[in-house]
Image (cartoon, helix red, strand yellow):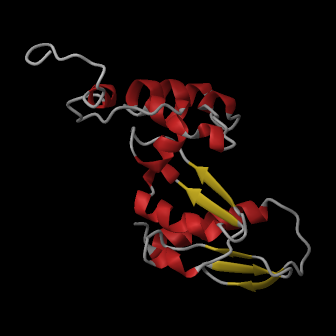
């Protein structure tokens, strides 16, 4: 689970976004290392990502899940009920991290329930073609990190497709019972 340091890093990201927007000088009523309370009563809180520490909030109106492909399913399942009373929004942001977990399941099986966007690196004006060319040659996770592709794990003996077919009653065995 993410640590207190990672929560502080998330807060730094939030501060960068906040700094990019012109806001009136009185927009904050409280600003701490891991939380901001706005003058209108809204709050932004960065929490360590564990199932145990996430349980303290209710009626959440916006839940941002950064690096969602690396968030454990236990944590995802714990935070979903926080949105029930408020009918809040849950935004998952991530590049893929293999064919596993809730982020992959949502992307591959439940996309019709979500609004989704896929932005490959070539669409980002901040990334140069030269950088991508070098990464393509040197980074074994290039397709995953820059083209939003869910890849098989490098040390995996059987593909996910093969494993899924093991449970398919329509596939006939090569030998033995017919």
Q: Position of residue 165 (x, y in %)?
A: 29, 26
**Relative to the observer, which residue lies in front, 70 or 113?**
113
**Which quarter of the image is occupied by the N terminus?**
bottom left
For residue 154, what is the image quadrant?
A: top left
Residue 66 to residue 130: above or below: below
Residue 72 can be seen in this image: no
Residue 46 can be seen in this image: yes
Q: Position of residue 67 (x, y in %)?
A: 52, 53
Residue farthest to the front, as pictured: 178
Write the residue at 28% across / 31% down: 167
Q: Position of residue 14 (x, y in %)?
A: 67, 65
Compared across the picture, whether 176 is left or right of 126 comes to: left
For residue 147, what is the image quadrant?
A: top right
Write the residue at 65% across / 79% down: 35
Residue 3 to residue 66: above or below: below
Write the residue at 59% across / 50% down: 93
The number of numbered badges drawn on the structure is 0
**Relative to the observer, which residue lies in front, 101 or 138?**
101
């Amino acid at each position: 689970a993410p640590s207190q340091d990672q929560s502080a890093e998330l807060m730094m990201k939030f501060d960068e976004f906040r700094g990019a927007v012109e806001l009136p000088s009185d927009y904050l009523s409280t600003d701490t290392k891991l939380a901001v309370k706005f003058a209108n009563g809204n709050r932004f809180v960065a929490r360590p990502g564990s199932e145990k520490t996430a349980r303290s909030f209710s009626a959440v109106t916006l839940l941002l899940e950064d690096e969602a492909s690396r968030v454990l399913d236990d944590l995802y399942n714990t935070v979903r009920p926080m949105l029930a009373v408020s009918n809040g929004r849950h935004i998952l942001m991530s590049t893929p991290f293999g064919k596993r977990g809730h982020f992959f399941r949502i992307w591959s099986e439940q996309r019709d329930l979500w609004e989704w966007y896929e932005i490959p690196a070539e669409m980002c004006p901040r990334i140069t073609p030269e950088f991508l060319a070098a990464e393509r040659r040197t980074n074994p996770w290039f397709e995953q990190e820059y083209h939003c592709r869910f890849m098989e794990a490098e040390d995996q003996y059987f593909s996910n497709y093969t494993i899924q077919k093991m449970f398919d009653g329509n596939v006939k065995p090569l030998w033995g019972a017919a």
